[in-house]
Structures are given as C-alpha cells and as structure tokens.
Amino acid sequence: MDASEEILRKTLAEKQSAIEAHGNAVRALKAAGAAKPEIDAAIESLNGLKLEKTSIERQLQAAIGGGDSSLNREAFRQAVVNTLERRLFYIPSFKIYRGVAGLYDYGPPGCAVKSNVLAFWRQHFVLEENMLEVDCPCVTPEVVLKASGHVDKFTDLMVKDEKTGTCYRADHLLKDFCNEKLQKDLSISTEKAAELKHILAVLDDLSVEELGAKLKEYGITAPDTKNPLSDPYPFNLMFQTSIGPSGLSPGYMRPETAQGIFVNFKDLYYYNGNKLPFAAAQIGQAFRNEISPRQGLLRVREFTLAEIEHFVDPENKFHPKFSEVVNLEFLMFPREEQMSGHSAKKIPLGEAVSRGIVNNETLGYFIGRVYLFLTCLGIDKDRLRFRQHLANEMAHYAADCWDAEIECSYGWIECVGIADRSAYDLRAHSEKSGVPLVAQEKFPEPREVEKLVINPVKKELGLAFKGNQKMVVEALEAMNEKEALEMKAALESKGESEFNVCTLGKNVTIKKNMVAISKEIKKEHQRVFTPSVIEPSFGIGRIIFCLFEHSFYTRLSKAGDEQLNVFRFPPLVAPIKCTVFPLVQQQHYEEVAKVISQSLTTAGISHKIDITGTSIGKRYARTDELGVPFAITVDSTSSVTIRERDSKDQVRVSVEEAASVVKEVTDGWRTWTDVWSTFPHHSSGSVEADE
C-alpha cells in the first residue's frame, strides 16, 4: 500500500476511536447530570474531532482517487462517448436490433482515424525495420491452436447467476468488489486495505478454488439481481466453428494473429535468405467470446490486432539500432517497484537495459519504438507507462514481458504487450507438426562436439507399425536430448519404452531393436537452433479509444454561453486534415473553393468542402468537434485564410499556395509555428462571432 494512504487510514482509525470515546464521555456526563458548561465543552471537543475526521477522509479520498474524482472521470467519459457516437466515430453494432454487447461499428471519421493509425504503424514499424508482412486467414484449424495451447488454456473463469443463468467473469466481480471497498469504504482498517490490495496484485494467479473461496468469503453476489453465484469454472474464449460441410474438421476464429506467423516461419526464413534476425508482421481481426464485455472499445468480441514477431538468435539479443532509443526517458514500472508499493518513475531506457531491469537490447529497442509510436499518435507521455509483468503474470517460458499501459477514465489500460517469448512457440509447432522450425548458423571452421545420435531401425519399425512407420521415424528423430536419454535408459533397463507420437495422437511401444541411441564426437559445420521471438502486440481499438480521450477537451464559445467540444488530433491521425469554407454563398468564392479542393486532392490531403449557409463560426465549431486541424476560408478570389484548430490563429496565403502549405504541415515538413512566422496574420474580427 502507498505509504501516505497507509498513514491516512491509520490516522482515520485512531480518530474514529477517539470520536467513539468522546461520544461515550458526553453520554456519561449527561447521564451523571453534569453541569451544562462541562457538557458543552465536551460536545465542542467531539465536534472538533469530527471535523478533523472529515478532513482526513477527504485527504484519503484524494489519495485513492475515489469520490469526486471518480464522478468526474465518469462525466468526462460520458461526454467523450456521447460526442464520438453523435459524430459517428463509432456506434454499437446492429443498433436497430438493440445491439450485441462487445460489438461496435466504426463510422466514417472512426474508419479514417483507424486507417491513419494503421498506416503510421506500417510506416513506423514495417517499413523502418524491413519487416515481412503477411495476411493469414481468421479461421484456424484446431490442431494449430491445440499446439499453441489455446484450446486447453485460453480460458477465463466464469460464474453464473444461479436463478437467471446470467454469466459473469469471476475475476472481474472480485476486482470490482476490492476496488469499490478501497475507494468508497474509508472505514476499513489498514490491514483490510492491504489484504484487498494484495488480492488485486495476485488476481491473475488465483486458482479456481481460491477465487471461489474469496467470492464466498466476501459475500459477492450477482451485480444485477443480488442472487447467489455458482462456483467458478473455466470458459474457453474462442469462437468455435467447423471447416467444410461435414463438420468433421473443427476450427476456431483466431484469438490472435501471431500463430499465422509462427506456422509460416520456415518459408519466411527462406524468403529472408536464411538470415536472422528478421521480423514478420500482421494486421488483422481477432475474436474472443468475452463472458461479459464492458468498457466500450476496450473489451470487445471482435477487434483489430497489429502484431510483430521478431525472430532472433537466443544467444545474441543485441540490437544494432538500440543506440537510436538508448537516451529515451519515460515512465517505467518494474516489478520491484510494484511489489514494494512504489509508483512508476522515469528511467532512461539505456539504464533499464544495462541494469538488467529490461532483459535484453532487442526487447528494450522495441519498448523504445512503441513509446515513440504512441506519443507521435497523440498519447500523452505523462499518462503512458511501461509496466513489467509480475512473476505470477508471466508465462513459464517467457524471459521478460512489459505492457504499455495508457491511463484513461477507466484507469490504467494495457494497450500493447511487448514480450520475450523465448523459443516456446516455434518449438510447440515443431513438435506438433513434425516439421523442424529452426535456423542455422554456419561456422567459419568445423567444430568437434559431442552429439546425441538417434538412428531409427526402419526395417523393424516398418514390421511393427506398417503404414505409420514414417510418422514414428520422424517423431523419434525429432526427440530432444532429455527425451532420448530417458528412452535410452528405459530400453537398457526394461528392453522397451512408451513413446508419444503426436502426429498419431497416441503412445506406442518402442523396443530395443527399433532404435539405436548413442553419443558420438562429430565435426559440425553449423549450429542448428530454434530462434527466440520478441513479440510486440498492439490492441488497435484500445489505443484509439485512449487517443480519443487524450485528445478531447472543451472550450467556451466566443459569446461565453456554450461549451464547445474539440478533438486535438495531430494531423497524422486526424480523420479529415482540412476543411474548405467559402465565407458566403457566392459563385466566385465557390469556384475558388473547388480549385483549392482539387489541389488538395492532387496533394493527397483528405478534406471536405462546406458550402452550407451556416455562419463561419458554427462551421469551425462543427469541424473542431471532428478534430480537423486546419480550415481554409475563401473570402477573396486571390488569397484565403488558413486557421489552426487549437490556437484558432489564422494566416493569409495566396490561393495557389494554400494546398501546399496545408500539405507541408500535415506531413510534418514544417510546423504551424513556422507557418505563423512566415505568412501575414489575419484577425478574425467578426468571422468567429458565433464560435
């Protein structure tokens, strides 16, 4: 628990005890018929203690971020969501049929923002790192997801309302209970608060039994009906389907895009000239059958992922371009800081890698690149942190894992995961498919090494397994050293050994005469190994929602009688870069507007002409609400004004220059400050009287 919060909770408990003692004293004085001045003095002292308690409660409420701040967050979120839905950035899917939880449609401006984010992602990662981009099917055969572990382990724990059958995520109910207690019940002891915070810290590590026990201990019931809940049980989040009309080939809608890259490793490695390191990337839809979707775009059943799999030699995780990000300094939240109750702090990336806080240079390089990507999009760098996974969160095979978390009205939200997954994925698919997914390093000179040699006796295997001989031989040859030595020991002691052939899906009995296993000194000309993978995985919808919130603000109209909504999108992601307004509805102004529009189209600048009769101020306000950074107002046939959204400053440029000026600023070749210092300023006068 944060030190200041702990002190405040202890002080509050002491103050409450003092109030109770003083209250008893006042009642005793009254019962004893004490003199009025004595009773009045005791009451005054009691009231003073109550005022002090109220003050401590306010301080504690501020320290834990509850009370008014939570109401303000809710009001802010509602204002953003109302604006987004009204301006058709996104809306609930199938709205006329009352919608389906966890499914949303992007409207025209939302599609444009998403398209711009993905275009910048490709530029920032795929082009910068010469990545190999692939596009794999959403429908995935069961065998692939069986190998990856998704069929057995891609589950959340679910509970049901025992009377209505409504389903809830068990960990969400426990998390909500703990957060609500911590934020709203100021009377709980420091020990109880510490217990609840510990539960939140280890929530992902609780077993089915532990989670069920906690739900019962705290008397947690169904949120909507207060009915009792069932015991938790696992629910697989994948959408199941079948491939082909027979229904005999099971499949799933992919829960992530990564597996399509892993199963194509062999061909991608060949395409890359059999050289490491290299990265493959994929943008695509993923599907998760969420138990109880909530929080808008943050937890949905169909969403866009952008994932990178950077394959690297496990013995050499240095990165040649690490020097480009080494001096970046941003909020990092290592596991030691989390466990000791401290907050995230700014750490130079080079220091984090050199001290071993971040496992290796390649992982550090991608953390730095993710930071640059998100801040260029418009994410507030002071509300962005990189949190290291705790030991209980990490997969057993992972070397290190960090989440880029963005603070929004729902709290800190994981938007990008950056993990060193070691060689787990390629090994799992090699074992299941029987196809070696490996890389080679050629030696300048041959090396003598002790090598385990596995020689299947094909004649004996053929007699024993007939048509399945090939699969048994391949499985024997694919054994790792540990398995082979265990089989050798069993054959020598018992004369036979049980052996699982994954391609047959069963165990077979291998006898001593069927395989020879020995260690020999051999000369090797190359090293064969399974590459490690560094995986940055981006939840595009989550990033976009946080971007919406970070970009949203309100300002008073010029008359001071109305709050106007504004999205301060950088030109990079703005859905429309520029609007063109003829000041009044006159044909010669409209002709100039068409000429400028054609120039903007030729320059590749998304724009919109507004020739409605509405006042120019209202037209400005309307486009500010869409986040359009620039507006060209045609008030002459020779020159026009260009207005910048956030400052509302305007400059005057010639008709011929207008499109090129907007393009230079939107493409980042020059800044608005530079434009402001180059061109004559224009005073709006009455132009924005209605804004």
Image (tube, rainbow, N blue to C red):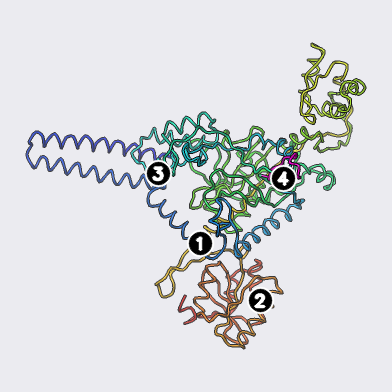
Q: Are marks 4 and 2 in contact (CB under 8 Å)?
A: no
Say if the magenta span includes residue 250: yes
Which marked residue is nearer to the observer: mark 2 or mark 1?
Answer: 1
Kind of residue sitting beneath label 3: Gln
Q: For numbered disc 3, what is the local secondary structure?
A: helix
Position of 48 with respect to 240 (left or right) is left
Q: Earlier in the sequence, mark 4 or mark 2?
A: 4
Spatial distance from mark 3 to mark 4, Cα to Cα? 40 Å
Residue highlighted by disc 4: 309
Residue highlighted by disc 1: 552
Residue highlighted by disc 3: 183
Kind of residue sitting beneath label 4: Glu
Q: Are marks 3 and 1 in contact (CB under 8 Å)?
A: no
Q: Position of residue 322 (x, y in %)?
A: 69, 47
Q: Are marks 1 and 4 in contact (CB under 8 Å)?
A: no
Q: For numbered disc 1, what is the local secondary structure?
A: strand
